[in-house]
Amino acid sequence: MANKKFQLSITPLKLSQIPSEETIVQVGRELIESTNSWKQGKTFVHGSVHTLYQPKGTFEPAGWHCRLSEHTPEEATFDDFWTKLGENKAENEKNYVPDIKKVTLIKELSPTQSIWSLYYTFPPPVSPRIFTVLQTMHLDPNSPRTGMIISIPIDLSSPEDAELAKHEEKGVKGRYTSVERLMELPNGKVEWRMATCSTPGGSIPQFVAERTMPGKISDDVPHFLRWLHAGKAKANGTASAATPTPKKRLSFLGALSPTSSRVTPASPTTEVPAAITE
């Protein structure tokens, strides 16, 4: 068992099974680089977000899905992305992902590694879902800069973790693992690439979530950019204090949550690059 190489999957880890940060980052890097050879999927958000996928193997519970997009400095700089995704990621996600109603810091393991519990709610009769993950952040400051965020499902059911488990909300346990990479490109743009594997848990058929995954993960791109620009406008005094509410999106539960792959038109008082609002 000790010689078995750690691999990213939706099988949750107990705290005693968490590998070193170096191992997590290396395995995450290998996975995100492997997406270059994955099967091509559909494009979304008017062709600006490309998807790829890796079908699940015979003994694997779920397949992998990836999205990638490139962004000009007017849309978002590397610093814009990293300060919102590489720092306080869970807290920030709650602001632009409508289904996330609460995030809880379970335990901080290091300045770049912490365990979070994310509480998702959906319209009845779908029960709330709980996703507890270890988030590992890694920034390579050498030019061109690269940043990675790796999320791994965590199991707090062991007796020794009972006190930590008390901080989790009540609901059906879902699981996901993901690797996000932010990378400066020679043309001055930033590539945002994310690969994920997930299961909603409960009685939701896995094929339902798999079928709608490409559109769901693609919607995160315009939702994030709109939230980012609304925050900038507010800071500059050019927008009202209210952040524009994104349209309902696909969730970890796939088609069971109302969705739209388009973005709500920008408020007249909020200046947003055209690529975000098309």
Image (spheres, rainbow, N blue to C red):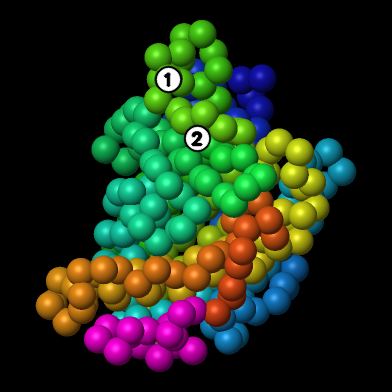
Residue 168 as seen in the image, left or right of residue 9: left
Q: Which residue is mark 1?
A: 166
Counting from the top left corner in percent of width and height, residue 193 is at 51, 65
Residue 198 as seen in the image, left or right of residue 166: right
Q: Is residue 110 magenta?
A: no
Label located before the other in sequence (1 or 2): 2
Q: Quadrant of the N terminus?
A: top right
- Three-letter code for the amino acid on which mark 1 is drawn: Lys
- Three-letter code for the amino acid on which mark 2 is drawn: Thr
Q: Is residue 264 magenta?
A: yes
User: Which residue occupies the foreground of this view, 221 or 258?
Assistant: 258
| Other residues around mark 2 within 10 Å, as few (<14) / some (14–19) / many (≥20) | many
Q: Which residues are magenta?
A: 263-278
Can residue 131 be seen at all in this image of the molecule?
yes
- Which labelled disc corresponds to residue 153? none
Q: Residue at x 59, y 44 (%)?
A: 176
Q: Which residue is mark 2?
A: 132
In this view, the residue farthest toward the right is: 58
| Other residues around mark 1 within 10 Å, as few (<14) / some (14–19) / many (≥20) | few
Counting from the top left corner in percent of width and height, residue 129 is at 57, 40
Counting from the top left corner in percent of width and height, residue 123 is at 59, 51
For residue 201, above or below residue 158: below
Secondary structure under the numbered disc 1 in the rendered image: loop
Say which quarter of the image contains residue 143.
Answer: bottom left
Q: CA distance from mark 1 to mark 2?
A: 12 Å
Q: Nearer the viewer, mark 1 or mark 2?
A: 1
Q: Residue at x 30, y 89 (%)?
A: 268
